[in-house]
Image (spheres, grey):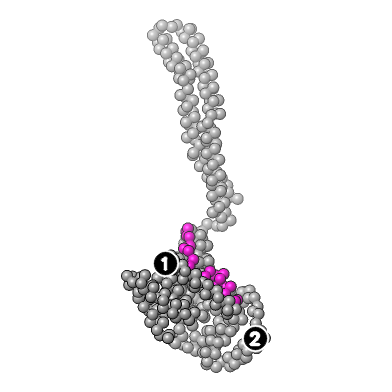
Amino acid sequence: MLFWVICGALTVLTGLYIGLPMVRARRADAAANPDVALYKAQLAELDRDVARGTIDATEAETARTEISRRLLAASHRSDRQSAAGPKTVAALVTFAIVVGISLVTYIGIGSPDMSDQPLAARLAEADQRRAERPSQVELETAAPAPPPVDADQEYLEAVARLREVMDSDVGDAQGWSLLAEHEAQLRNYPAARRAQARVVELKGEEASVQDLQLWADLLVAAADGYVSPETESVVRQMLNRDPENVAARYYMGSLYNQTGRPDIAFVTWRRLIEAAPDSFHVALARAQIEGAARRAGTEYTLPPETGPSVDQIENAQDMSDEDREAMIQNMVAGLAARLANDGGPPSEWSRLIRAYMVLGEEEAAQSVLDEALGVFGDVPEAVAEFEALRAEMAATE
């Protein structure tokens, strides 16, 4: 209640600050009324006549009384006209506009129920939230159960047998990796992330960044999208080995977005979206960056999307192998047509080449590579990127 009293008082003061000059101007107009000026001049002239002796005191007093009466009447007429005049209306309209704009603006962007949030206090609170966020186990306990997977009984029994074999804790990284894959397919994400942790443990220093990335993905999936302290540890290992890793950069942005620092999340995701080739993690960043930008007080418009959306990627996970391949083929064909008609940056040409490589269409990949070299032959960075792809293609033959 005190908040609104203060706001009301400030609004009234602002209105008076704007309206008083109009009122003063109205009074000045009244003083400049020609009738009023005439009668005042007559009074002054009458005093001079008395001083010169051209009129006696009795006549002067009678004349002064009559002139004063007319002056008072003229002054009253001027006040009544000014009171109903346009300046008063303008003052009232201006006051109403000021109050209206103030209320509409505050209702739109203000939060009267929130307490003051000085910058230092907000930063300290964000640090505290990040330091005290729940552990992986706590997040998994609170996470809703994922929808069941429609799997046949034979497959479920095979996975159960694999669990029994791996429960003996054999030092078989390949077996644990296989178990992690199948647990993930069954959406048993906590079991999958534990199996993948065992893979990384068994491989030791030979564990790849891709092994760590799969571990981080499974940790986040098991925690219902939250970045736990355990996930942050894995992500920092990824960044130490590959500072440009897309998944790691996305998860660091997500961590800050979840703990009260949307400004850091926005900057992190913006660099990712505007520089990295499209991928699952880039699509996730695109889905959240505008909300982070708004909370950080920044206006941001997403650049055009060139790859599959988050919904398309999620839908593809539930497709049959044939339907998934058909969807990927359509996406690749669409990208190829757009590059042929409108062109695009080297990163999109590289993405198309890699897509053909993944699909096993070596001739198409080689054809696009040759065309890209022709288009970007005078761009050394692009040529180096394409030549690296050529070497990669040769190594897989």
Residue found at x 56% / y 29%: 84
Q: Nearer the viewer, residue 116 or 21?
A: 21
Mark drawn on residue 343: 1
The quarter holding residue 187 reads: bottom right
Is residue 188 visible to the viewer in this orientation of the structure?
Answer: no
Residue 340: percent from left, percent from top: 43, 68
Classed neighbour count for the residue bearing mark 1: other residues with Cα under 10 Å, few (<14), some (14–19), many (≥20) = some
Q: Name the residue that disc number 2 marks.
A: 156
Mark drawn on residue 120: none
Q: Distance between the residues labelled 2 and 1?
A: 48 Å
Q: Nearer the viewer, residue 226 or 151?
A: 151
Residue 13: percent from left, percent from top: 52, 41
Residue 269: percent from left, percent from top: 47, 67
Residues rendered magenta in the picture: 298-319
Residue 249: percent from left, percent from top: 46, 72
Mark 1 lies on a secondary structure that is loop
